[in-house]
Image (cartoon, helix red, strand yellow):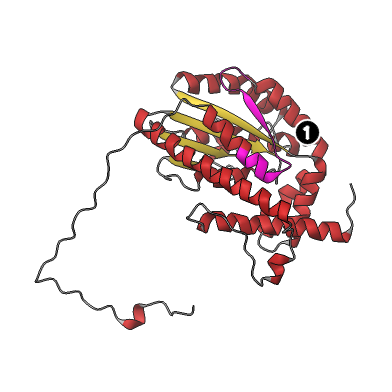
Amino acid sequence: MSLSDAELMQRIHNDLLDSYDEELELELEDRNYEPVTGGDSLHESLNNTPQAQENRRTYFHELFRLQAELVKLQDWVADTGHKVVIIFEGRDAAGKGGVIKRITQRLNPRICRVAALPAPNERERTQWYFQRYVSHLPAAGEILLFDRSWYNRAGVERVMGFCTDEQYEEFFRTVPDFERMLVRSGIQVIKYWFSISDEEQHLRFLGRIHDPLKQWKLSPMDLESRRRWEQYTKAKEVMLERTHITEAPWWVIEAVDKKKARLNCIHHLLTQMPYEEIKRPLIELPQREHHDDYVRNPVPKEMFVPEIY
């Protein structure tokens, strides 16, 4: 696939618009989305056709609706003591972080946590392979999202030669029993693989190269993974075949379209638990107490942050 300079710039603009949408999602508190216009020449130059505007309205409408359901799911998990682990795997730039952000965006971080573990240190490399993941597993009433997981061994470690053939085979012997053990202990395990095409990853990497706010996402390992696309494909195929078990099956998300992938993933996640809305008592705000002897001490002016804006 070869794009002209104009098509490449349009693609980068579209990704930039998606970044604007991310920030809008974080800031927007009402449920009525209106496109940002009114003299912003940069924004107006982006993909702002009537159809694109309608697609974005639909996306936000569905996103907010699904996030409201996630809040109900969270309340049900806390109320029932349910425990769930959700694993997000996929190639670099497949959109795992984007969907995790939208799942957790309006939830209580004490109930819904994210674990994104760095490369193991010297001590961790001498431990039982699963040991550093076990400490993050949920207690009753918690949801744990793994942004990459123990499946690193079946992917990056295999392709980059960070594990031996014996360690690789031992992983496949162990992981089905490990996940069955988690399920027997009362932890629900849900596994998602985000699937993108060769061409789509290429375009997303180009977008990161040209976006100074996203260049940090491109590590030397990411660039090497791009070169070894076919090796990663083979490793993924083996992983899905050997670890797709009844107790913890894999679910594949078509992720070439970021927004559709987010909505489809959240919708599917909601179907995996028999949650129901938990009725809460009405909250009444208590009257503030006033005391005649209370005097508020002034704060020194030099302690205030300068009001630049």
Q: Is residue 246 magenta?
A: yes
Residue 193 visible within the image: yes
Q: Which residues are magenta?
A: 245-263
Q: Is residue 59 magenta?
A: no
Mark 1, other Cα within 10 Å: few <14 / some 14–19 / many ≥20: some
* Foreground pick, 79 / 201: 79
Q: Is residue 34 above or below residue 165?
A: below
Picture quadrant where residue 19 is located:
bottom right
Picture quadrant where residue 121 is located:
top right
Outermost residue toward the front in this view: 50
Residue at position x 57%, y 46% from top? 61
Q: Position of residue 38 (x, y in %)?
A: 64, 70
Q: Is residue 68 above or below residue 168?
A: below
Where does label 1 land, which residue? 233
* Foreground pick, 229 / 82: 82
Q: Is residue 222 above or below residue 187?
A: below
Amino acid, disc 1: Thr
